[in-house]
Image (spheres, rainbow, N blue to C red):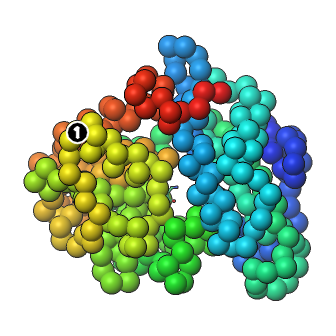
Amino acid sequence: MKLPEYAYFKGEIVPYAEAKVGILTHALNYGTGVFGGVRAYKNDDNGKLYLFRPYDHYKRFLNSCKMMLMDLGETPESLTQHTIDLVKKGGFSEDVYIRPLAYKSSEMIGVKLHDVEAEFSIVALPFGKYVSNDTNAHVTVSSWRRLDDNVIPARGKISGAYANSAFIKTDAVRSGFDEALVLTQSGHLSEGSAENVFMVRDGVLYTPAVYENILEGITRRSIMELAAKELGMEVIERPIDRTEIYICDEFFMTGTAAQVTAITKVDHRPVGDGLMGPVAAKLRELFFDILRGKNEKYAAWNLEI
Ligand code: PMP
């Protein structure tokens, strides 16, 4: 991966090479960081970059900080401004991925959340596709389980919790799958390693509810709204059993990185007829237009840089 040229670090934009932490940094040792993932999309017709729902991303980021007792003294608006400044400085002419990170910065020994300093950084880098087979992904149900809210809350995007996602993803990829679905301790579907999930059965769209140890995805929220308003679908949040995925009509995953990725095979069984279905196809078309500022109706989701 090509490293970015600049980073927002300790209150200013600096060359990326200067944005360094010591090896005793609390977050590096104990996973006491929280992060985000925001994207800016290039519209090739007008040459502009559009940041997708930055205030919602930063609201979730600050809520994650709150859980971890980190007070950054920032607002969604100020963090968005730092992001705009950084992206402008980078002079990008393509799609960009933005990674804000808040971390317990004290260099010390001691497992706790209180009385530890916090800092935050932001980097921005060019970014293409995250899942290569985004119209025909083959996924497996992981033998790992999702972290429970009373273990490490999945609703907070906490760095340490991503060791769980890393176990899930690597086992799946090494076994030849594109991604994995993960179940909760009680055996219901939770999400992917870094994506929320949706199932279509008989024209109704289902997704696991927020109490199923999911990250409350910004893409998930957007897709639920689009399915209801633009496709006129009933959207239901409820527990989903593992075997429902084997017999459903359509299945797809959503996320800032994965966008809307159609899953056409689960554990070697075709989903529906084994091809991307009409709901995923329509949602992808709608969503991709919105992301590039080509749909006036949802212009409020975008911030032009
Ligand atoms: N679940 C997990 C575990 C994730 O890491 C992500 C990526 N942020 C998502 C779901 C999707 O969330 P969003 O649409 O906000 O990117």
Identify the image quadrant of the N terminus: top right
Q: Which residue is tagged 1?
A: 231
- Where is 72 relative to 19, above or below? below
- As drawn, which residue projects farthest toward the top? 45
Residue shown at 43% from the left, 73% from the top: 213
Can residue 5 be seen from the camera position used here?
yes
Residue at horizontal 47%, vertical 32%?
291
Residue type at mark 1: give it.
Leu
Task: State left or right for residue 133 relative to residue 166.
Answer: left
* Quarter of the figure with residue 241: bottom left
Q: Residue at x 61, y 54 (%)?
A: 59
Q: How many marks?
A: 1
Q: Horizontal and vertical percent for residue 207?
A: 30, 60
Left or right, 31 with respect to 292, comes to: right
Which residue sits at x=52%, y=84%?
Answer: 150
- Which residue is nearer to you in this view: 12 or 81? 81
Q: Looking at the picture, how far across and down is residue 12, in whole percent?
A: 87, 44
x then y, percent, for residue 238: 27, 68
Viewer-proximal residue among 155 and 170: 155
106 over 206 or under it: above or below: below
Locate residue 177, reporting x and y percent. Answer: 35, 59
Measured along the vertical axis of the image, is residue 265 above or below residue 213?
above
For this rendering, which residue is in front, 277 or 204?
204
Quadrant in the picture for residue 232: top left
Under circle 1, the secondary element is loop
Q: Is mark 1 within 8 Å of ligand 1?
A: no
Tell whether 36 sits left or right of 294.
right
| Quarter of the view holding residue 228 | top left
